[in-house]
Amino acid sequence: MQFQSTGRVAVLGGGSWATAIAKIVMHHEEHITWYMRRDDRIEDFKRLHHNPAYLTGLHFDTDRITFSSDINEVVKNNDTLIFVIPSPYVKSHLKKLKSNLREKMVVTAIKGIVPEESLTVSSYLEKMYNIPEEQVACIGGPSHAEEVALDRQCYLTVGCRSLENAQVVADLLTNKYIKTSISQDIEGIEYASVLKNVYAIAAGICHGLKLGDNFQAVLTSNALQEMRRFLDEVQPEDERYIEASAYMGDLLVTMYSNFSRNRTFGTMIGQGYSVKTAQLEMEMIAEGYYGTNCMKILNKKYHVSMPILDAVYNILYEKISPAVEIKILSDSFR
């Protein structure tokens, strides 16, 4: 059944991707609600007309935005909710929630897994908040916030078990520089978006070790094969085309782009930084760090051959030398 939107759209999150999503949505909506956790950040935004911490060159007409740090107020007063909260903090934000999500169209633009639950964000929302599966969607595809801010061409895929509702969300996002497609493979898109962050950390580690472009190409090829093995085991889908932008496209941009915070994080690890030092210096969340642990736990159930995931886990969590671990990994490549 198609979701009937009343045009009340909220963006939940205060980071760079949330800021880019808000920009995209405001091409269609005259007014949006924007949830941010910190009142001081909201006041600075109103005064400066831009996010004071992320994408600071992107200016907004704040008269068209209702800001709020009250998640219950935001959920109650809007019917389309776009969650862009980093995955490690999803549970802590939602713990405050008393408003009902069941009547809402809930969209996750979070490229991560809910820690401790080992669930994709869509599965977590459906399970914990009793939302009908056809009213939960995800946004995937190669989409660096920095390029959205510059109006550079971007291709997004909206996943939802209801293609009608996927199209409703896609229409909300489509504009002159955002092209959209729709898919029913919501879990596949979400798992792919988690894995590409793990593989981007691997690419960064190899860059930090100065292993060169030839090795990066082989790493990327093996990463795509590993992703395919996992998705085919966990979420078989006859219509899935692994070379599509939601899978391979997102993988490539995250592994190669200088905008990729996961690649940057991996590069620092490859150069000898500790995990803690790299995290402190970046001042941004590298979702792949948390995704690595979640995927490692999840794969204990499925037993898929995932040597790249295992190598990144050993480096980040077992403190194995990157040079030693990548040498072992490279021996498995063809």
Image: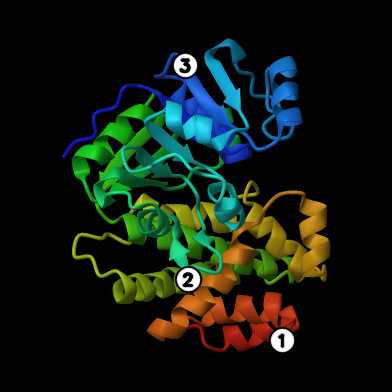
Observer-side mark, 3 or 2, equals 3
Say if mark 1 contacts mark 3, CB within 8 Å: no
In the rendered view, tell whether residue 199 sits above or below residue 177: below
* Mark nearer the N terminus (3 vs 2): 3
CA gap, disc 1 and disc 2: 19 Å
Query: Which residue extends farthest top?
Result: 63
Residue toward you, 304 or 203 = 304
Q: Which mark is residue 114?
A: none
Question: In the rendered image, which residue does mark 1 sit on?
Answer: 324
Question: In the rendered image, which residue does mark 3 sit on?
Answer: 31
* Mark nearer the N terminus (1 vs 3): 3
Query: Which residue extends farthest left?
Result: 1
Q: Secondary structure at mark 2?
A: helix
Residue 213 visible in image: no
Q: Position of residue 120 (x, y in %)?
A: 43, 61
Disc 1 crowd rating (10 Å Cα; few below 14, some 14-19, many 20+) is few
Question: In the rendered image, which residue does mark 2 sit on?
Answer: 223
Q: Position of residue 116 (x, y in %)?
A: 55, 69
* Mark nearer the N terminus (1 vs 2): 2
Disc 2 crowd rating (10 Å Cα; few below 14, some 14-19, many 20+) is many
At a point 16% along the width and 40% down the height, the residue shown is: 1
Q: Is residue 292 left or right of residue 130?
A: right
Q: Is residue 172 left or right of residue 264?
A: left
Q: Secondary structure at mark 1?
A: helix
Disc 3 crowd rating (10 Å Cα; few below 14, some 14-19, many 20+) is some
Three-letter amino acid code at disc 3? Answer: His
Residue toward you, 143 or 105 = 105
Q: Position of residue 239 (x, y in %)?
A: 20, 60
State the image quarter where residue 144 is shown.
Answer: top right
